[in-house]
Amino acid sequence: MRKLAFSGMFFLAAAGVAQAADPLGEWKVEEDKATIRIVDCNSRLWGVIASEQIPGNLDNKNPDKAKRTRPTLGIPVLLNMKKAEDDKEKWEGQIYDATSGRTYDANIQLKSANTLRVEGCVAMILCGGQTWTRVVEGSTTPGGAKSGAVAPGTPKTTATNPPAPKTTAAPFPAPVGAPKTAAPKGATAKAGSGDQATSEVCLLPEIASAPAK
């Protein structure tokens, strides 16, 4: 009887851990080329390049010529994702591939507390995906940076940004799909988050002016 009760308690505890898991935080892409920091901005998920393996990359394939000289470090790659109606663990939106300058329809789905499946498709024909691994706070990320660092390019606050990590790690190297533009609309950091990095990411112009589709 005690064994049964203990098993039930263990099951409830495990269920609580599963429910507490979410995509927020820093994730290492396949082949360790970069990490992506996912934040909640006005109930939408956004992901920016937080660290890179090779330094000095520019967003030189961007369809907006004015952005082609900006560093890829700190740019949004997971764009304006909202929770799927049919799956509470899935979020749907777009993903930007800096290696081609193209944008895909995409979704992310939490497979476990530390595993995230990222998939993108064009017209549901050309599809690709990766499985990302959660980065433990304080661990070393690609380029030797510490996780939790705010990437250059985010608005300045009283805290100082750490040295720039290192390379463009666009989640989907194959150039498929057409680039998409965003219409303006305000977005703010999730109320009460107390997360400086989240606030800075949410203040990026592309995110703050994005539409709530």
Image (cartoon, rainbow, N blue to C red):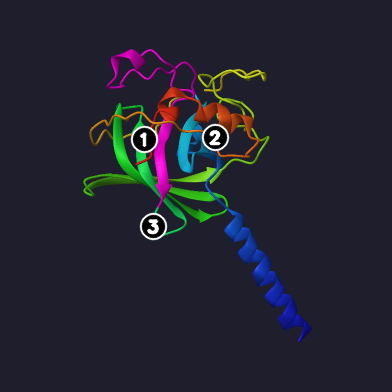
At x 74% / y 76%, what residue is drawn? Answer: 6
Q: Is residue 155 above or below residue 176?
A: above
Which residue type does callout 3 highlight?
Glu
Looking at the image, is mark 2 or mark 3 earlier in the sequence? 3
Amino acid of disc 2: Ala
Q: Which mark is residue 189?
A: 2
Q: Residue 73 shows which numbered tag? A: none
Question: Vertically, is 79 above or below 99?
Answer: below
The residue pinned by badge 3 equals 85
Give the image location of residue 186, x and y in percent: 43, 31
Q: Are marks 2 and 3 in contact (CB under 8 Å)?
A: no
Q: What residue is rendered at 46% in x and 37% in y?
A: 46
Q: CA distance from mark 2 to mark 3?
A: 22 Å
Mark 1 → mark 3, Cα distance in angstroms: 19 Å
> Magenta span has 93?
no
3D distance between C-alphas at marks 2 and 1:
15 Å
Q: Is residue 169 visible?
A: no
Earlier in the chain: of badge 1 and badge 3, it is 3
On the image, numbered disc 1 is attached to which residue? 211
Residue 51 in percent (x, y) is at 53, 27
Q: In what quadrant of the picture does the C terminus appear?
A: top left
Quadrant for the N terminus in the image: bottom right
The quarter of the displayed image where residue 100 is located: top left
Q: Earlier in the sequence, mark 2 or mark 1?
A: 2
Magenta span main SS: loop
Whether pointer 2 and pointer 1 mark residues with C-beta atoms closer than 8 Å, the reply is no
Q: Which residues are magenta?
A: 54-83
Binning the other alpha carbons within 10 Å of mark 3 as few (below 14), some (14 to 19) or many (20 upward) gives: few
Q: Residue 170: which quarter of the image? A: top left
Inspect the image, locate mark 1, and give the three-letter code of the amino acid beneath it. Answer: Pro
Mark 1 Cα shell of 10 Å, populated few (<14), some (14-19), many (≥20): some
The answer to whether 193 appears left or right of 37 in the picture is: right
